[in-house]
Image (cartoon, grey):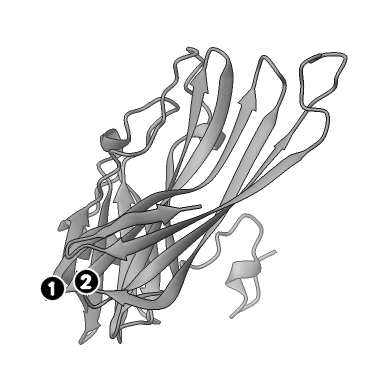
């Protein structure tokens, strides 16, 4: 039976309509405006950026497998603005993922979407300076070693100024590691908050990390942790004129 007029989306097997950014633009529109033509080998993550009127931020990267070098994703961040029913490229910047640790030293099979490196936009109000809100990007990758395996997530912050993007912050914000020998699982989660104090015109940043280590079955892992262990670390970052650097940790 044919779908009723005005209810075509309810037809069996039909796909939902594409999301319209700024009420008018699809992901394909973003790709064309950012890259001069949609490259089918790229993956995109796009969202409206309400910090600036009629703006969209998008991530572009190439798919990769477990153990791939982070730079092989060729990741970049772009900012676009909608004008007169068209998208204009405002700025773009290649992401520096050189601090990420994503080895596959245990030689596990690299396939599997669930363990593939991923990039995602993180767009809360990271107000790094008066009148300046940074764009957040999260990079997540799995890692394996002969005696351990895990996953880590890094938070990158980029500022847009005078039509240029610059990466100003890069820190590990979450991780999970399993010790194959002891059977311990260590999980860390972190939150970045903007402080009132300033250095060189930028607000200080605080990263609060909570780490928990839990053991497995004692019969299988005789040396495993018997009671969960918890600790909290606070790391304070200040502006050095070009980017944020660690000031102290406790």
What residue sits 47% from the left and 35% below the top?
Answer: 116
Q: Residues within 10 Å of mark 2 (few under 14, many from 20)?
A: some
Horizontal and vertical percent position of residue 32: 22, 61
Q: Residues within 10 Å of mark 1 (few under 14, many from 20)?
A: few
Whether pointer 2 and pointer 1 mark residues with C-beta atoms closer than 8 Å, the reply is: yes
- Give the vertical position of 105 relative to 2 (above or below): above
Disc 2 is placed on an element classified as: strand
Q: Is any part of residue 97 visible from this angle?
A: yes
Disc 1 is placed on an element classified as: loop
Q: Quadrant of the N terminus?
A: bottom right
Q: Which residue is mark 1?
A: 163
What residue sits 82% from the left and 34% below the top?
Answer: 227
Q: Which residue is mark 2?
A: 160
What residue sits 40% from the left and 66% below the top?
Answer: 205
**Which is more toward the observer, 195 or 150?**
195
**Residue that lies at the very extreme toward the right in this rendered image:** 219
Report the side of 1 relative to 16 (left or right). right
- Give the vertical position of 72 relative to 56 (above or below): above
- Give the vertical position of 62 relative to 120 (above or below): above
Task: Specify the quadrant of the image occupied by residue 159.
Answer: bottom left
What residue sits 47% from the left and 21% below the top?
Answer: 110
Horizontal and vertical percent position of residue 148: 58, 20
**Which is more toward the observer, 225 or 54?**
225
Q: Is any part of residue 27 visible from this angle?
A: no
């Amino acid at each position: 039976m044919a779908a009723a007029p005005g209810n075509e989306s309810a037809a069996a097997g039909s796909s939902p309509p594409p999301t319209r950014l700024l009420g008018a633009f699809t992901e394909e529109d973003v790709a064309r405006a950012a890259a001069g033509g949609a490259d089918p080998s790229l993956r995109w993550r796009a969202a409206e950026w309400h910090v600036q009127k009629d703006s969209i931020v998008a991530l572009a990267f190439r798919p990769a497998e477990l153990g791939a070098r982070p730079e092989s994703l060729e990741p970049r961040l772009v900012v676009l603005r909608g004008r007169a029913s068209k998208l204009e490229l405002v700025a773009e910047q290649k992401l520096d993922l050189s601090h990420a640790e994503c080895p596959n030293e245990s030689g596990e099979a690299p396939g599997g979407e669930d363990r593939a490196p991923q990039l995602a936009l993180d767009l809360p109000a990271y107000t790094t300076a008066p009148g300046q809100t940074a764009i957040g990007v999260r990079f997540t990758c799995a890692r394996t070693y002969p005696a351990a395996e895990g996953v880590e997530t890094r938070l990158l912050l980029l500022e847009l100024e005078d039509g240029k993007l610059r990466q100003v912050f890069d820190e590990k914000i979450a991780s999970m590691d399993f010790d194959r020998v002891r059977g311990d699982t260590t999980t860390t989660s972190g939150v970045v908050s903007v402080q009132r104090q300033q250095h060189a015109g930028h607000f200080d940043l605080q990263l609060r990390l909570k780490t928990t280590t839990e053991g497995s079955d004692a019969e299988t892992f005789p040396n495993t942790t018997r009671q969960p262990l918890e600790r909290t670390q606070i790391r304070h970052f200040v502006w050095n004129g070009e980017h944020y650097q660690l000031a102290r940790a406790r």
